[in-house]
């Protein structure tokens, strides 16, 4: 069983807002100051920069994934265009799992924060899409892994 999940589109909300605002400001500049020679260049530059920012944020979101298997949870985080970090957490080292939905917007847009406590430290995953579903899947896999570990440990103790 493999479950791949990503962060919610709410991660790029600031880039979307900046993009929409740059369009509105560009249109306002063109309408109000149409006679000025620099208006079209400034509007185009503003739109170009905000478009690049939006694409950059969407690419980072797309390539930052979480992979849950029957043995581990792997976090692959894209940081910038050329830097990638990978964190592996063995399911047997997970002590507890919890999640929270941050208010009205989290309910409406179905995102939240997962907190995974391990023997080594805590793993906090923010802006998880559908945190309840991910929590249930992760909890089920962790329960199966821990019961399999207990069974294997009992077999080793018998011998």
Image: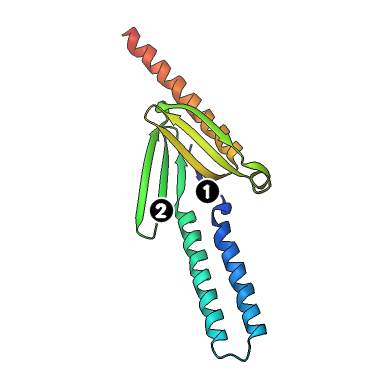
Residue under label 1:
7
x then y, percent, for residue 19: 58, 67
Task: Identify the image quadrant of residue 34.
Answer: bottom right
| Label located before the other in sequence (1 or 2) | 1
Closer-to-camera residue (125/138): 125
Task: Look at 41% across and 53% down and name the residue there.
Answer: 78
Task: Look at 43% across and 33% down and name the residue there.
Answer: 122
Task: Look at 61% across and 73% down and name the residue there.
Answer: 23
Q: Secondary structure at mark 1?
A: loop
Q: Which mark is residue 149?
A: none
Q: Is residue 3 visible?
A: no
Above or below 91: residue 134: below
Q: Which mark is residue 78?
A: 2
Above or below 141: residue 74: below
Task: Look at 58% across and 42% down and name the residue there.
Answer: 112
Q: Secondary structure at mark 2?
A: strand
Q: Tell me how far mark 1 sits from mark 2, CA to CA.
A: 12 Å
Above or below 41: residue 58: above
x then y, percent, for residue 69: 45, 36
């Amino acid at each position: 069983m493999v479950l791949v999940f990503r962060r919610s589109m709410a991660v790029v909300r600031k880039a979307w807002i900046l993009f929409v605002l740059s369009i509105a400001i560009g249109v306002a500049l063109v309408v109000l100051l149409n006679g000025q020679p620099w208006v079209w260049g400034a509007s185009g530059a503003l739109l170009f920069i905000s478009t690049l920012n939006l694409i950059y944020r969407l690419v980072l979101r797309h390539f930052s994934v979480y992979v849950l298997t029957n043995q581990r949870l792997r976090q692959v985080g894209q940081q910038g265009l050329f830097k990638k970090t990978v964190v592996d957490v063995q399911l047997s080292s997970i002590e507890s799992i919890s999640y929270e939905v941050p208010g009205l917007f989290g309910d409406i847009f179905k995102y939240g924060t997962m907190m995974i406590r391990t023997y080594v430290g805590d793993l906090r995953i923010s802006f998880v899409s559908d945190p309840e579903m991910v929590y249930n899947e992760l909890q089920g896999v962790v329960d199966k892994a821990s019961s399999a570990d207990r069974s294997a440990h009992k077999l080793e103790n018998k011998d």
